[in-house]
Amino acid sequence: DTGVSQNPRHKITKRGQNVTFRCDPISEHNRLYWYRQTLGQGPEFLTYFQNEAQLEKSRLLSDRFSAERPKGSFSTLEIQRTEQGDSAMYLCASRETSGSIGTQYFGPGTRLTVL
Amino acid sequence: SQQGEEDPQALSIQEGENATMNCSYKTSINNLQWYRQNSGRGLVHLILIRSNEREKHSGRLRVTLDTSKKSSSLLITASRAADTASYFCATADMNYGGATNKLIFGTGTLLAVQP
């Protein structure tokens, strides 16, 4: 399977704990995106990487959130001191760099439940 | 924040009927894309229409775009039970000299196709 993969698929944690999610994009895709989706809503943009550079962050990405893409391949999203309001589906997407028109390919998501 | 609204929020039809979903957005766009999401899963890209296009077809899908009204519609013809899913429109933000980056999603239409 050469699509975008995300791990874990599900994460249940207690409030106050730290969690980390991983995203492996399609191998030749330089651009990587993180989105968050709450129940009944469309995904909302969190952050964007081109290779290892984090080029944009949403105001939704509070100080408790940090994302990295150290080698320009896989990416991690860490949430520190989780709160119940962090419960959501976290989606990763990737696309090619070339051209200004591009399809983003999404992974299956990581569903986070904070108790 | 969401880009706009999708209409209707929910739609229930019989197999074989056509389904039409509408999307409105707020800002200038480079392109508009439609995605499908099966329950609790990641998003699957369906079709992309550029801002200088008015209509596009892909199999049983027909998309229209009216940039003067900032609206788009997705028509699924001869629907099947497997088409049951949530459908989202997403607009590509104009940024970095025209290169598209983050997607801004609507609130989605939940389509149920009864066998």
Image (cartoon, helix red, strand yellow):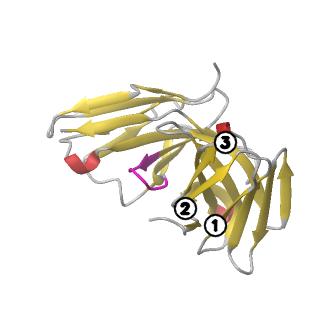
Q: Using a 10 Å C-alpha cutoff, classify the residue at mark 2 as few (fewer than 14 neighbours), some (14 to 19) or many (20 or more).
A: many
Q: Using a 10 Å C-alpha cutoff, classify the residue at mark 3 as few (fewer than 14 neighbours), some (14 to 19) or many (20 or more).
A: some
SS at badge 2:
loop
Tell me whether marks 2 and 3 sit on the same chain: yes
Left or right, A2 with respect to A75, comes to right
Above or below residue B57? Residue A25 is above
First in residue order: circle 1 vs circle 3: 1
Give the dominant element type of the magenta stretch: helix, strand or loop.
loop
Query: Of discs 1 and 3, which sits in the foreground?
Result: 3
The chain containing the residue under callout 3 comes to: B
Q: Which residues are magenta?
A: A35-42
Residue B23 got which mark?
1
Quarter holding the N terminus of chain A is top right
Residue type for callout 1 = Cys
Q: Which residue is mark 2?
A: B106
First in residue order: circle 1 vs circle 2: 1
Q: CA distance from mark 2 to mark 3?
A: 19 Å
Rendered location of residue A113, percent (x, y) = 27, 38
Q: Residue at x 59, y 57 (%)?
A: B11
Above or below residue B34? Residue A107 is above
Is residue A89 inside the magenta stretch?
A: no
Rendered location of residue B74, percent (x, y) = 72, 59
Rendered location of residue A40, percent (x, y) = 43, 54
Which quadrant of the structure image shows residue B4? bottom right
Q: Are marks 1 and 3 in contact (CB under 8 Å)?
A: no
The chain containing the residue under callout 2 comes to: B
